[in-house]
Image (spheres, rainbow, N blue to C red):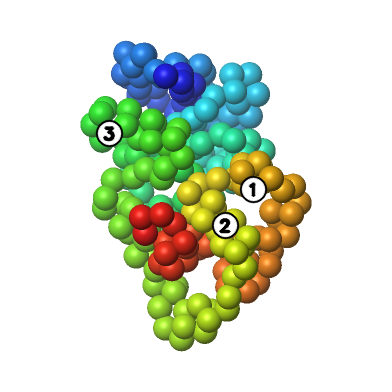
Amino acid sequence: MSTIKVAIVDDHTLFREGIKRILTLEPDIEMVGEAVDGEEVVALLTQCKPDILLLDIKMERINGLQVLPQIVEQYPLLKVIVLTAQISQSESVKVIKDGARGIILKHAASEFLIKGIRKVFEGELWADTSTMTQVVESLSRKYRGERDSERDKRELSHREKEVVALIASGCRNKEIASKLFISEQTVKTHLSNIFQKLEINDRLELALYAMRNGLVEGS
């Protein structure tokens, strides 16, 4: 069993201590670091190199919403789970589009957090049903109407469909390149062509397109 290295960024000491106590009871999870705000997060990630980052998005100083895009860009293999006491529909959509792999409310049961960490580590998206429904419904509204019917007529090549399927399964460019035995630059070229063909702006929209059009196993 692989050990999952976890770090947490939250400005409430009692909350951080509680999370650490919960997670240290799990044999496959190791707490490797903590920080109190977004300003400390880069130093934290450089020092401890976690697999999973638990990130509070509503800290008083530099918050998670501000640093999330930078974190995802600089640490493409890191998987971020957003922690928050409450989150609006627009914020849920934003953090997922910015690269978060999960959203967990702070009042959730410890079992939900632990399972979420394991599922995100395995490559899945994780959130409670209500939050995920809000995200999907918000994004799905963008696909209704004539734009969809016109866009769906545009054929993707076999290779482009492979890239889309891997995007939908949560793979980053480096992972896609490895799985398809191509360069990262070739992956970027495929993505550019796919975005242009489908009139799609980002990877989350592309993942939803893949699920709606049967490009992902089980969809």
Q: Is residue 136 left or right of residue 162?
A: left
Q: Say which label, 2 or 1, has the lower sequence index.
A: 2
Q: How many C-alpha atoms fall within 10 Å of the one at disc 3: few (<14), some, or many (≥20)?
A: some
Considering depth in this image, is 38 or 128 the residue closer to the camera?
128
Residue 44 in the image: above or below residue 161 = above
Viewer-nearest residue: 160 or 22: 160
- The N terminus lies in quadrant: top left
| Label pair 2/3, CB-CB below 8 angstroms | no
Q: Which tag, 2 or 3, sits closer to the chain's start?
A: 3
Closer to the chain start, of discs 1 and 3, is: 3
Q: Residues within 10 Å of mark 2 (few under 14, many from 20)?
A: some
Residue 195 percent across, percent down from the top left = 62, 67
On screen, residue 66 versus residue 213, left or right, reads: right
Instruction: Find numbered disc 3 in the image and state the secondary structure of the residue it sits on.
Output: helix
Q: Is residue 61 above or below residue 147?
A: above
User: What's the residue at 31%, 39% (across, down)?
Assistant: 105
Q: Which image quadrant is residue 142 in? A: bottom left
Q: Which residue is mark 3?
A: 112
Where residue 71 appears, x then y in whole percent? 60, 38
Q: Quadrant of the C terminus?
A: bottom left
The answer for how far apart the CA atoms under marks 1 and 3 are is 34 Å
Residue type pointed to by label 1: Leu
Mark 2–mark 1 CB contact (< 8 Å)? yes
Give x and y (percent) for residue 97: 51, 54
Depth check: give the residue in front, 207 or 112: 207
Separation of marks 2 and 3 at Cα, in angstroms: 32 Å
Residue 180's tag is 1
The image quadrant of residue 178 is top right
Residue 176 vs 50, above or below: the answer is: below
For mark 2, give the secondary structure. helix
Check disc 2 and report the residue beneath it: 162
